[in-house]
Image (spheres, helix red, strand yellow):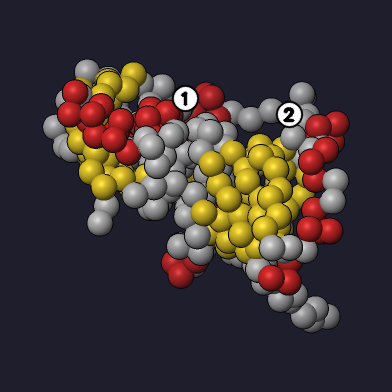
Amino acid sequence: MNIPMPSIAPIGTIATPFKQKFAIPRQPNLAQAKGVIQFHASYANPQGFKGIEEFSHLWLLFHFHATAHRGWKPGVKAPRLGGNAKLGVFASRSTHRPNNIGLSVVKNGGIEVTDGMASLTVYGVDLLDGTPILDIKPYIRYADCLPDAQDKLDSYGTIPNRSVVFTHTAQRQCEKMQGQHPDLATLIRAVLSQDPRPAYRQSQDVDDKVYKVALYDADISWQVKNNTVYVLDITRIR
């Protein structure tokens, strides 16, 4: 029996500090990055959000739009396994999925209504700027928090937690930009402390390469030495 596939259209898009896939936290809530969901007109009616303030956290279902063109793979490389070993796609949270659907739990920052149109602020996002949002559901603690749940991720490899040091130059540059982005320094520390380098480089004692990551409209240059992340330079993206 052939069952027709439902047509799924985004209800809006989310604005986040993450302008590129590189350095996005591997899971939600590893950095308290802010996101603002702007809804398409058909879904921005404030009545659709009545009661949402009663929930501290929300589930976001979204589309991996930036990698959808690559298709899906039955086996995917797992960063926590060193970047070369593979897991089955359905045993992972890889972006390379049959329907390119992602799921993240985020902190509810509240609804704002402007000219009769609702927008939603959330925190702890791990989504690329401009990601299409497919649906929003409340996080329900008694059902969604399972204390007996088990996984083996910690045995595969823990997420790094490196010290982050700003050079004097980077510190001054960051201070100049914090009038527009008050959370910039905090966000840089949270993102870079997790060492977003490829997994095979994270174990290297010496890495002279200078990496760059874009957050908001800032281009951040950084380097890892002696297990410490040094922020070298912060420039505004023109």
Q: Residues within 10 Å of mark 1 (few under 14, many from 20)?
A: few
Q: Where is mark 1, residue-wise?
A: 158
What amino acid is found at the position of numbered circle 2 in the picture?
Ala
Most distant residue in the left direction: 208
Identify the disc placed on residue 149: 2
Residue 98 image point, x, y percent: 59, 64
Q: In what element is the residue under mark 1?
A: loop
Give residue 185's quadrant in the image.
top left
Is 140 drawn above or below residue 119 in the view shown? above
Q: Can residue 146 be seen in this snapshot?
A: yes
- Residue visible at 69% across and 63% down in the picture: 115
Callout 1–callout 2 Cβ contact below 8 Å: no
Residue 148 image point, x, y percent: 77, 24
Q: In what element is the residue under mark 2?
A: loop
Residue 85 image point, x, y percent: 42, 41
212 or 46, nearer to the observer? 46
Q: How many marks?
A: 2
- Residue visible at 43% across and 48% down in the picture: 18
Q: Earlier in the sequence, mark 1 or mark 2?
A: 2
Give residue 61's quadrant in the image.
bottom right
What amino acid is found at the position of numbered circle 1 in the picture?
Thr
- Residue visible at 40% across and 42% down in the picture: 180
Residue 82 image point, x, y percent: 38, 35
- Quadrant placement of the N terminus: bottom right
Q: In the displayed structure, does residue 151 sit left or right of residue 162?
A: right
Separation of marks 1 and 2 at Cα, in angstroms: 18 Å
- Residue visible at 59% across and 28% down in the picture: 152
Q: Can residue 133 be seen in this snapshot?
A: no
Q: In the displayed structure, does residue 151 sit left or right of residue 143?
A: left
